Image (cartoon, helix red, strand yellow):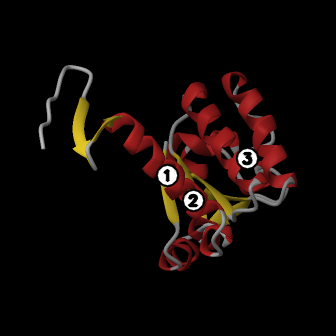
Amino acid sequence: MKSTTNAGFIMKKVLFGEKMTFSWLAVAGACMAIMWASAVFTGPALAEPAYKSRTLVVHIATDDASAANMAVILANNMLEKKMAVVLFLDVKGVSMGVKNPPKNLEGVGTMVKTFLKGGGRVLVCQHCLGMAGFKEEDLLPSAELSQPERMSKLLHEDPIVIDY
């Protein structure tokens, strides 16, 4: 049996007296096709993704419009995929959970309203809200004040937490 390898990863092999040329890339491609087909046509692949059984908590502590925008877009996208999603707003992030957000967060505030209408939950740190100069009556309708026991309960449910 004689084999040679060149820069193109081509191997020649004597098999039953005939030369057979094959590429390792072709073999890898065939293996990938078999794995894909077995994943598509088997039962477990059709099961609900594991992440959907957990709550996603998107923590926003900034009033940076770009970061807040990305966070709320993610939250809305996951809500559309039928995942339970909570926006947790604290520190400077509380300013997007009020009826009249600062000018730089007006667009994000509109997306937070859409998030609430879509069934998402918004928890706003009560202490941070006061420190930012807002009152409970300034909160968006359906936004909830967050207190330590409420957050403790949520975190004991083993959520996925993303921090902005």
Q: Which of 87 and 24 is in front in this view?
A: 24
Q: Which of marks 2 and 3 is nearer the N terminus?
A: 2
For label 2, the SS is strand
For label 3, the SS is helix
Residue 32, image x, y percentages: 47, 49
Q: Which amino acid does label 1 sit on?
A: Ile
Residue 98, image x, y percentages: 74, 44
Give me the C-alpha separation between circle 1 and circle 3. 14 Å
Q: Does residue 163 lie above or below 124 as drawn?
A: above
In screen coordinates, is 6 left or right of 156? left
How busy is the neighbourhood of tag 3: few (under 14 within 10 Å), some, or many (20 plus)?
many
Residue at horizontal 22%, vertical 42%? Answer: 14
Q: Does residue 161 lie above or below 96 as drawn?
A: below
Which numbered disc covers residue 70? none
Q: Residue 37 appears in which quarter of the rendering?
A: bottom right
Tags 2 and 3 in contact by the CB under 8 Å rule?
no
Residue at horizontal 54%, vertical 32%? Answer: 67
Q: Nearer the viewer, residue 103 or 44?
A: 44
Residue at horizontal 64%, vertical 61%? Answer: 40
Q: Which of marks 2 and 1 is nearer the N terminus?
A: 2
Tags 2 and 1 in contact by the CB under 8 Å rule?
yes
Q: What residue type is labelled 3?
A: Asn
Which numbered disc covers residue 162? 1
Q: Residue 88 appears in which quarter of the rendering?
A: bottom right
Identify the residue under disc 3.
Answer: 76
Q: Nearer the viewer, residue 86 or 129?
A: 86
Which numbered disc covers residue 57? 2
